[in-house]
Amino acid sequence: MKEDAMNNGQTKPGYNIQIATENPFITNYGIFWRPNDQGTLIPFLTSFSDRYGMQSDEVCADSGYGSEQNYAHMFGNGIVPYVKYNMFHAEDYYVCPMGRHIHHTRDTVSKSDLGYVSVISVYRTESCEGCPLRGICYKGKAPYREIDVNHQADEYKAEAKRFRLKSNAKVKIEFGLVALAHNLRKYIAVERMRSKAVSSCL
């Protein structure tokens, strides 16, 4: 990581956090000291199978995990990899719950009450009409959904996150608690959506 505040040439210790998700829920996590993602994929998949006694049929990951060794491992274990190889191509998009791409359409400027100017990137789906998840994912009247993203603010938020404990074992416990809290929040949100849907049908 970057040099510490003393600027004496020393680097700060850091952890490479890997998570697996199924829909909105965290199903597995791993704490690694490797600075890049390529070397974490195989031990992470192994930890998943060790934990559940089974393995995913498909794995979706970004190009940071694309390497010959990782492809060989996944194909050799019957896993269908939706993993781009490094530098496959550069695209700027998000993915909605239905798996549709939400592409970047434009940038706008936002000014706060204090006069701070931020650049907001706007992403838009092609169409949400006929989507079975529209009632949960999007309640607007327009036939498409837009999301606003402040990339600079997100970078600052990521930089601000720090672990309070030290050592791989303790950090693993700490992140496990974070993952548990995340899943509980998602579960409560899903149950509220289901309750509203049932109420509206009565």
Image (cartoon, grey):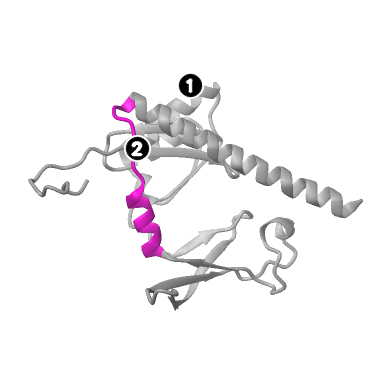
Residue 193 to residue 143: above or below = above
Q: Is residue 159 magenta?
A: yes
Give the crowd class for mark 2: few <14, some 14-19, many >=20 residues within 10 Å. few
Start-end of magenta stretch: 151-168
State left or right for residue 3 relative to residue 201: left
Give residue 50's mark: 1
Residue situated furthest left in the rendering: 8
Give the crowd class for mark 1: few <14, some 14-19, many >=20 residues within 10 Å. few
State left or right for residue 25 relative to residue 160: right
Q: Nearer the viewer, residue 71 or 104?
A: 104
Residue 135 percent location from the top left of the image: 74, 59
Residue 191 seen: yes
Q: CA distance from mark 2 to mark 1?
A: 26 Å
Residue 110 to residue 176: above or below = below
Q: Amino acid at mark 2?
A: Phe
Residue 118 percent location from the top left of the image: 39, 72
Residue 122 to residue 23: above or below = below
SS for callout 1: helix
Label the magenta part by its dominant secondary structure.
helix
Residue 39 percent location from the top left of the image: 31, 36
- Asked whether disc 2 touches disc 1, contact meaning CB atoms under 8 Å apart, the reply is no
Residue situated furthest right in the rendering: 202
Residue situated furthest front in the rendering: 114
SS for callout 2: loop
Residue 82 to residue 77: above or below = below
Give residue 36's mark: none
Q: Amino acid at mark 1?
A: Asp
Residue 26 seen: no
Read off the residue under disc 2: 163
Q: Residue at x 69, y 73 (%)?
A: 143
Q: Residue at x 77, y 46 (%)?
A: 194
